[in-house]
Image: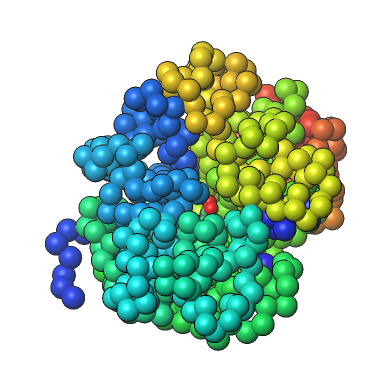
Amino acid sequence: MNRSFPPLFLFLLLIGCARNSEPTTVATETADDDWWKESIVYQIYPRSFQDTDGDGIGDLNGIIERLDYIESLGVTAVWLNPIYSSPNDDNGYDISDYRNIMTDFGTMADFDRMLAGMHERDIKLIMDVVVNHSSDEHEWFVQSKSSRDNPYRDYYHWWPAEKGDPPYRYSLFDAEGNAWKYDSTTDAYYLHYFSQKQPDLNWSNPKLRQEVYDIMTFWAEKGVDGFRLDAFQFAAKDTTYPEFPGLTDTTFIDYYAMQDGLHDYLREMNEQIFSKYGVMSVAEGAGRNFEDAHALVDADRQELNMAYAFDGVDVPKYGGYALTTMKEVFSRWDAEFAEDGWLSIFLSNHDQARMVSRWGNDSPEFRAPSTKLLNTFLLSMRGTPYAYYGDEIGMTNIDFDEIEDYQDIAARNGYTKARAQGKDMEQFMRELNFLSRDNGRTPMQWTEGPQAGFTTGTPWLPVNDNHAQINVAAQEDDPNSILNHFRQMTRLRQDHPVLVHGSYELLLPDHEELYAYTREWEGVRMLVVMNFSDEGVTVDLPELENAEVVIDNYESLSRTGSSADLNPWQAVILSL
Ligand code: GLC
């Protein structure tokens, strides 16, 4: 069973317990329909990447300025978190106009230049599509709430007050945890699985669905190459509202995800958009179990291209994790998708702690080797890797003390709720310090200078003090830097299709410090050996005999015959 949504941290934080006609233009033509399998995706949180106008908020011109850098990384696609007009209750995941650019980020002309700049460099663009909900400031909702007989009423889910209290539903971002919000204008409640400013759209309404496809057509015709569907497995709702037994990891998924209708909507979207424009598609989450995941992404289903499952990042986050569990989870997913379907591989994103703080060791001593090791893993697994901005230089979690330091609505409302529930607030703050989404959203560290070269103004979220040590400029010219190791890894993956398509075999499954596997494809075999610990480890593997090192995050691998002594956090790939 996989429980791939929502990320466990949401529970930790929020329950306060610990969680037509032919298209006129077509997106970039590719010879290979499956280009997305060979892609290396770089995820950019635009708010935090590069500011060019001094307002402390990243912008599209900033991304344009950094296109050469992005190209130099060897990535082949960019996933951009939402850039549409938004009041920013949830940093752009609350959209008030799907056909416009958020003023903080720039203009449509900037967007067009950015997209052209990416395409000139053979970089594809994947846009975030947030259509489980809109902003309450979207015109649809303004109309919908204005009267019960407004034509937009059925774009959202309403519960008339005369029917009594609505059946309890849990909200992920609400300070009181209630997904129904009363609105006096029409004496009714509306449903919001996320914040009160993110009312859920009614996907059973064909008019709403057509509006969404029209919006996606708009972007596909601009030449966008892919879509990432945010929180989409919640889009179909069981509006008989069976009694919700209370929140646990399993009830949330069972009552909220993959409800009847979802596959129909995806097939319709595929027909109207994905297949018509040749754009790639990925949805956040991968259902309740492997069967769901396959039903979403197997090619004959004509729904989505690849799964983005959370079991990997849901390996216990706080207080350390067992490597054996991590290996078991990633290996299980690989085995399950060995024949049909395709996976995303990621260790961090904008909703997670920083990769090296979470999975590696972010102390000055081990930060560099452990980040390189994690990038070795990310770029040598089967599936499409998603590298998160800043992880290519080893950016770490930030240290916030006060709740006021946090910007994220999940942190702030989670705090209010935990207090109201009488939780141990010291413990809550310790966990927040490690798990908060703000950790993964601090500004990109370009230089050691003021505000890390991110802005000339005051950044919307503080720059990590460690930018003095961790920054792009310092790593550019150092051949042994984390950054240059990342570039070597992307090149290696691009030059060796075995790392993309090859079968995966886990070695030493019970070893508590070592993660080792082989990849094999068309007669080519590679061995990946990684020491996930602060201590040296000796390994004996018959495969090591006569194997040739192709990349190493240390200067050399000390070995004799089939035995090797690995340094702390050493990661080596060998050709067999
Ligand atoms: C997804 C996004 C997250 C957002 C939420 C609501 O989980 O990744 O950042 O807050 O959906 O849109």
Q: From this view, report whether residue 32 is shown above or below residue 532.
A: below
Indicate how the structure is coloured in the image. rainbow
Q: From this view, report whether residue 571 is shown above or below residue 209.
A: above
Work out whether residue 346 or residue 217 is closer to the camera in this orientation and state it: 217
Work out whether residue 561 or residue 36 is closer to the camera in this orientation and state it: 36
- Residue 474 at x, y percent in the picture: 54, 16
Q: Is residue 425 visible?
A: yes
Residue at the image position 54 percent from the left and 66 percent from the top: 181
Image side of residue 551 versus residue 50, left or right: right
Work out whether residue 525 or residue 144 is closer to the camera in this orientation and state it: 144
Quadrant of residue 56 within the rendered picture: top left
Residue at the image position 42 percent from the left and 18 percent from the top: 456
Residue at the image position 75 percent from the left and 60 percent from the top: 328
- Residue 23 at x, y percent in the picture: 17, 65
Q: Is residue 545 visible?
A: no
Quadrant of residue 519 within the rendered picture: bottom right
